[in-house]
Amino acid sequence: MINTTPRVRFAPSPTGYLHVGGLRTALYNYLFAKNKDGEIILRIEDTDRNRYVEGAVENLIDTLNWSGIKFDEGPHVGGNYGPYFQSERLNIYHKYADELIEKGKAYRCFCSPERLQKLREEQQRLKLPQVKYDKHCLNLSKEEVEEKLSAGESYVVRLNVEPGQIVKIEDVVRGNVEFNTDNIDDQILIKSDGFPTYHLANVVDDHLMKITHVIRGEEWLSSTPKHVLLYDFLGWEKPVFAHLPLLLNPDKSKLSKRQGDVAVEDYRKKGYLKEALINFVALLGWNAGDDQEFFEMEELIRKFSLERVNKAGAVFNIEKLNWLNAEHIRHKNVDELLPLLKEELQNSKFADKSFSDEYLKLVLEAMHERITFVKDIVEKSFYFFERPTSYDEKIIKKRWKDDTPQLLEKLIDEFEKLDNPNKEDFEKAMRGLAESLEIGVGKLIHPVRLALSGVGQGPGIFDLIFILGKEESIERIKIAIQNIQFDKKDN
RNA sequence: GGCGCGUUCGUCUAGUGGUUUAGGACGCCGCCCUCUCAAGGCGGAGAUCACGGGUUCGAAUCCCGUACGCGCUACCA
């Protein structure tokens, strides 16, 4: 139906932070647009003055920027269809509200909140199938309206919905959905404070901003017929609708703060890579049709299609996110990881220590295939940044034998002989010693690991020794020989 | 209550009437590799396709009903 390149929008309201569900909506819009060389715009729906949160817009934009979703138009990048804050477009909404009133498709309503409240209660008491406004003010004469207007009475503008009609909407993910206007209330379009409601502002802006596809959460499906009515009343071409399945808590209720983190910034703070979060969220409700699950943004753009979006809600499962985070770390090289590690170091107890890029890259090389988060390097392999302050009891019991100190003394002697050794030199020295002593090399390896790291797991032992260096390794072994012997006597 | 949407392993999902003893992934378990931990390889447990009818030679796939879940039902978005 529409042959021009698509224009889509992500239209959050600035109520605090970017929800992961919002991130997915933004992402699907972005992927759809970029797949077709279209444009995506960011529009801030700040029409509810009561819910406005200071700094929310900045936070939203910052988080969106971090995620890698780039907008072609919006408050932060400009564009030809602005302003992109709805609060700055009030006169535009009034113009169209007036047009609707003139056409008889909307009307001013002067009913007090009290009357409305009573009406609702009355209808509920009578157990009427649906609770709706009774069109009381539609019957006001022109003169009565003028009178109230000049008397300064406050009013709202309502959509004039004609009962008994069928409104059909065609949804790319859900197919055809029909609504009977009997179930549709005379929606308020302009509030008494002069601000529009979502419904009016959304339709007007989508039209004026030449939006071709409305891709949004399923919670909007029920109000879509109101939007369709608005397009028809104003004589505008409708966009294509696509309503996305919801993201759910483990108990299948709508994803909420009570059951875990819902803000994108929470995940960012916890150390999730943007690539992993994007990859994960993309797979919640969409798949490429094959077995692939690891995706970079470019590939998502290439393969995305609305036709492959699911209908059912998806549980936000942190286990899979963790796996994807590890996968994305494994796919990155040490140069890409370096700044991330430096950042983690800055936020750790090692912030006042300094390490060369060279050193950190060696650590990364040894660790990046065995971690889930970059910060695991700081927390689980702390021994790259400080000497161990204690030794794992279980490992002592298992690996530290009576003859261990003598063996390690001999190993130190061998290491002392090495001149500017590389990894292989250390290995040759250790294996050579084990051979000449006719012992398994494990009798050396495990105690050395314990001495150097204090724990029983980590990278390959020769990597560990090489990274720490000859002097430091020897020193740590000496310290261990003293302390662990002491511990044993003590027990 | 009304209206709408949904329902395949614990979770994300493949599947669009016969190729299905329902495939993959995460997680879980075991084995291999191995200096440890991961990674990797191999294997395993795990879904009577919500339930009940119907259509059909044949249904997870089409139709109807029921149940359950979710969304909307605001001068919130």
Image (tube, coloured by chain):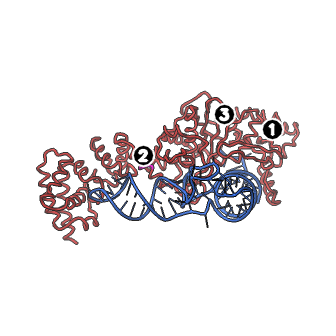
Tag in front: 3 or 2: 2
Q: Examine the rendered structure and indicate whether residue A153 appears above or below residue A386.
A: above
Residue A450 on the magenta span: no
- Three-letter code for the amino acid on which mark 2 is drawn: His
Label pair 1/2, CB-CB below 8 angstroms:
no
Q: Which residue is mark 2?
A: A328
Q: Which residues are magenta?
A: A324-329
**Residue A290 horizontal side relative to residue A238, left or right:** left
For disc 3, the chain is: A
Q: Please identify which colour was used for chain A in the image.
A: red
Chain shown in blue: B
CA–CA distance between discs 3 and 2? 42 Å
For disc 1, the chain is: A
Q: In the rendered image, is residue A154 in sight?
A: no
Between B25 and A164, the one lying in front of the other is B25
Q: In the rendered image, is residue A397 in sight?
A: yes
Quadrant in which the N terminus of chain A appears: top right
Tag in front: 1 or 2: 2
CA–CA distance between discs 3 and 1? 21 Å
